[in-house]
Amino acid sequence: QVQLVESGGGLVQPGGSLRLSCAASGSISMYTMGWYRQAPGKEREWVARISSGSGRSTDYADSVKGRFTISRDNAKNTVYLQMNSLKPEDTAVYYCNRQPPYIITWGQGTQVTVSS
C-alpha cells in the first residue's frame, strides 16, 4: 500500500502563507487526492481535492475557497497545498489521502499554526 508523508507545516502569522507537500511512496497519478485537516477537539474535515492524471479538476471547502490551491506533480508522486491569507481558524494538523471510500492509512500529518 502506498504510504503518505506530509511536510511543510509551521508557525505563521495571520495573513501569511505556507506550502504543504504530500509525498507518496509509489505512484498516485491514477488517484483523486485530497487534503484534510483536524483542529484540536474537532473531527477531521475535508479541505480540497484534485482529480487524477493531470489534475484538471479541483474542488475546495467553502472555508478555504479563494485562499488555498491544490496541485500535483505525478513525476514526483507529490501533492501540494498552497495556503495563502491564513487565518487563526486554519490552525490544524493537515493530512493528505485518497478520497472516500478509498481512504488508505493516514500519514502523521503536518502541524499548521496560525498565530500572532
Image: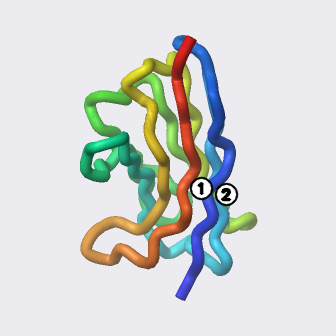
- Residue appearing at x 35%, y 41% in the figure: 40
Between residue 12 and residue 84, name the one nearer to us: 12
Apparent side of residue 45 relative to residue 33 in the rendered image (left or right): left
Mark 1 vs mark 2, foreground winner is 1
Front-lying residue, 19 or 57: 19
From the viewer's perspective, is residue 41 above or below residue 76? Answer: above
Above or below, 17 relative to 19: above
- Characterize the local packing of mark 1: few (<14), some (14-19) or many (20 or more) Cα atoms within 10 angstroms: many
SS for dot 2: strand
Residue type beneath disc 1: Val
For this rendering, which residue is in front, 18 or 88? 88
Q: 83 or 87, which is in the foreground?
A: 87
Quadrant in which the C terminus is drawn: top right
Q: Circles 1 and 2: CB distance less than 8 Å?
A: yes
Give the residue pinned by disc 1: 79
Q: What amino acid does circle 2 point to?
A: Asp
Q: Residues within 10 Å of mark 2 (few under 14, many from 20)?
A: some
Q: Coloured how? A: rainbow
The residue tagged 2 is: 73
